[in-house]
Image (tube, rainbow, N blue to C red):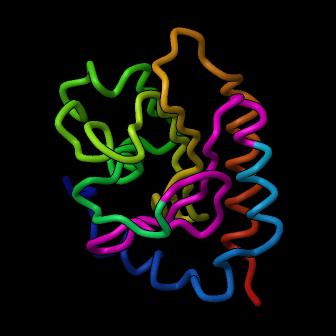
Amino acid sequence: MIVADEAARQAAVDRLDLPAKRWDERLQQIAGRAADIAQTPIGAISVVDRARQWMIAKRGPVDDEVPRALSFCAMAIHRPGEAMIVPDAAQDPRFASNPFVTGTPAIRFYVGIPLVDRAGYPLGALCVVDHEPRDQMPDLYDLSALAREAERIFTQTN
């Protein structure tokens, strides 16, 4: 699935200067705080590129990049301003056959908060992931506040 104005969104991603942002200590701290808030083993900040998702900050066992076609965050960016919540990926028809659900890392629970630039283009997501399904949701207000903090770091110029 592609965002409505994918060319403009991709141009916004290209302007990010990813090498300068990747593994930024402030973003690393945000990913860790997100995992703490959600009480999940994984917290991450992703950027969704043309064909892949890059993790630019993370805590926990998650690949540094994955194909966009398999990315949960690539689906989350379709609704900027709205959290994508997946209580049990194995029961969700969008994800039940995804190899990241059926195999390693065995994603069951996912929350992704889209990250947008000043023009409103979705760049990626702040996400938390667990290997167990969940009925109770983490504090979405606090996760959203962390996402806004990550957006400010994303949009700073060097």
Residue at 76% from the left image edge and 32% from the top image edge: 37
- Quadrant of the image containing the C terminus: bottom right
Number of numbered markers: 0
Q: Is residue 18 above or below residue 104?
A: below
| Quarter of image, res 45 | bottom right
| 105 to the left or right of 37 | left
Residue at 68% from the left image edge and 38% from the top image edge: 144
Residue at 60% from the left image edge and 88% from the top image edge: 19
Viewer-nearest residue: 42 or 105: 105
Residue 106 visible: yes
Chain part drawn in magenta: 34-62
Query: Residue at the front extreme?
Result: 103
Q: Position of residue 109 (x, y in %)?
A: 47, 28
Q: Is residue 39 magenta?
A: yes
| 43 to the left or right of 48 | right
Q: Is residue 141 above or below residue 43?
A: above
Residue at 31% from the left image edge and 38% from the top image edge: 101
Q: Position of residue 120 (x, y in %)?
A: 51, 58
| Quarter of image, res 56 | bottom right
Q: Is residue 47 above or below residue 143?
A: below
Q: Position of residue 26 (x, y in %)?
A: 82, 66
Q: Is residue 140 magenta?
A: no
Residue 83 visible: no
Viewer-nearest residue: 51 or 91: 91
| 136 to the left or right of 75 | right
Q: Position of residue 46 (x, y in %)?
A: 52, 61
Viewer-nearest residue: 80 or 36: 36
| Quarter of image, res 108 | top left
